[in-house]
Structures are given as structure tokens and as C-alpha cells.
Image (cartoon, rainbow, N blue to C red):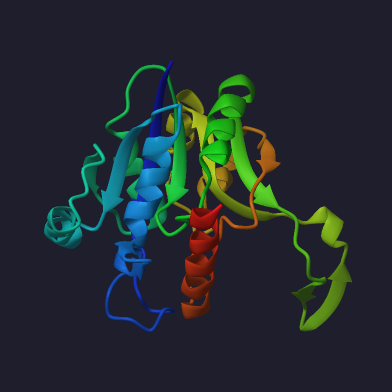
Amino acid sequence: MKYYAIIVAGGSGTRMNTAEAKQFLLLNDLPILMHTLNAFHQCDVNPEIVLVLNIDQHQYWTDLCTKYQFTVPLQLVKGGEQRYHSVKNGLKLIKGTAIVAVHDAVRPLVSVDLIAASFKIAEAEGNAVAAIRPVDSIRITQANETRAINREDVYLIQTPQTFQLAQLKKAYEQPFRNGFTDDASVVEKAGFPIQLIEGERENLKITYPVDLELASLLLQKKGSC
């Protein structure tokens, strides 16, 4: 069996209030994206890595690799208009029978254990989507009114989201819909049930400045263990 990881790096710095795309921001002296790629490279599964990046950032990425002497092997692919299109571009490189993990570039603290578990479970069950339960109370808004819902019925979805290639290929034959917010939503719409696996609290998605500060602290703690 062959294993692949599609790393989607299409984010901007809008919510970080930075001109630079957030995947390139420094996290403890190394760009966020490089931490993420290292996690997959260090996993025992040893997936082939496909990095999907805006075409206008390809040269910048090459320059960063030179600057930081970053040598993780990967294939670089042009990003698309939406996340959906970026993943679809990455899938074009993958043939035959395989297990494919799709992961957000700005989740740099994902553990090698979670990556390995997602591949193992997807190989056995068809797919594996990392998720955690919320700790806050949950309310939803309908018709300008809010109501509480049981948080035990709710999951917060993370990445990696890992699939047998046949499922993912079939799912991405569908035309784009606005409701396709992640790979699980695309695969579910194609008729495949989604298998949730336990994610990690530390596997945060860096979106706001406070997330970067927290990730730095967690990374320092991890390095001191």
C-alpha cells in the first residue's frame, strides 16, 4: 500500500493581521509550514508529500527552503480558487491504490501518532477524520432565535482527514458546492459514511495571533519533555 499526504497551504494573513500568508509566519524560528511538513516526514508511515501552494508563492517557498536548509522531499502543486480545487489539483498526482491524508498547513503541532492512526484506520475502515468534543456550551441560531444544544452531540473537526484513494477520487468528481468546507463534507456528499477518530487538543489551527502564541508555548513544552 502507498501512502500520501496532501498539505493544503492556501491561507492568507487576513485574520492574523499580517501581510504575509500565515503558513509562512515564524513559529519558534521556523516557518509554520515547515513544522507541519516535518511532522508528516517523521511519521513511520513515511507518506509521499504533496504540497499545494498558490502559484505566486512557489518561488518564495523555494527561497525559504534555501534560507532554512529545509530538505523534506515533496512534490509542489499549484493551488486552486477554493480549498476544494486545491485538493483536487493534488489528487491528480496520485494513482493506483493508496491511502491519502489531507492536512491543513497551519496545524503544525499534529503528532506523528495521530497521523499514523489516521492512515491505519482509513486503510481498514475507508476513512478517518480527526475530531474533538467541544468544552464550551453550544447554541445555534435559527430564525433570529438561539437555542442550546447538547455539546455531547457535537464534534469539532480537525485534520488530518484520511481516505482510501478510491473514495476521495470519486468524491472529487462532484462539482464544487459552497457547503464543501472540508474533505469529509465532500466525501459524505458522495455517499460514504464518515469515520471519526479522536483528535488532539494541541492540534490547533493557527488562525489568530493568540493561536501563534499558544502554539509557541506548546512547542517549547514539547521540546523540553
Is residue 41 shown above or below 30? above
Residue drawn at point x = 56 percent, y = 55 percent: 203
Residue at image coords 37%, 41%: 6
Nearest the camera: 64 or 183? 64
Instruction: Identify the residue shown where x is 38% and y is 84%.
Output: 17
Task: Measuring from the top left, give residue 199's x and y in whole percent.
Answer: 64, 47
Q: Is residue 205 visible?
A: no
Q: Is residue 20 left or right of residue 219?
A: left
Residue found at the far front of this picture: 224
**Residue 212 in the image, given as x and y percentages of width and height:** 46, 72
**Residue 129 spot, x, y in % from top left:** 61, 41
Q: What residue sits 49% from the left and 76% below the top?
A: 208
223 sits to left or right of 18: right
Please state the horizontal and vertical placement of residue 2, each as a whole percent of the image.
39, 20
Q: Is residue 76 visible?
A: yes
Q: Quadrant of residue 143?
A: bottom right
Q: Is residue 72 left or right of residue 58?
A: right
| Position of 191 relative to 135 (above/below) | above
Image label count: 0
Quarter of the rendering occupied by the N terminus: top left
Q: Nearer the viewer, residue 80 or 212?
A: 212
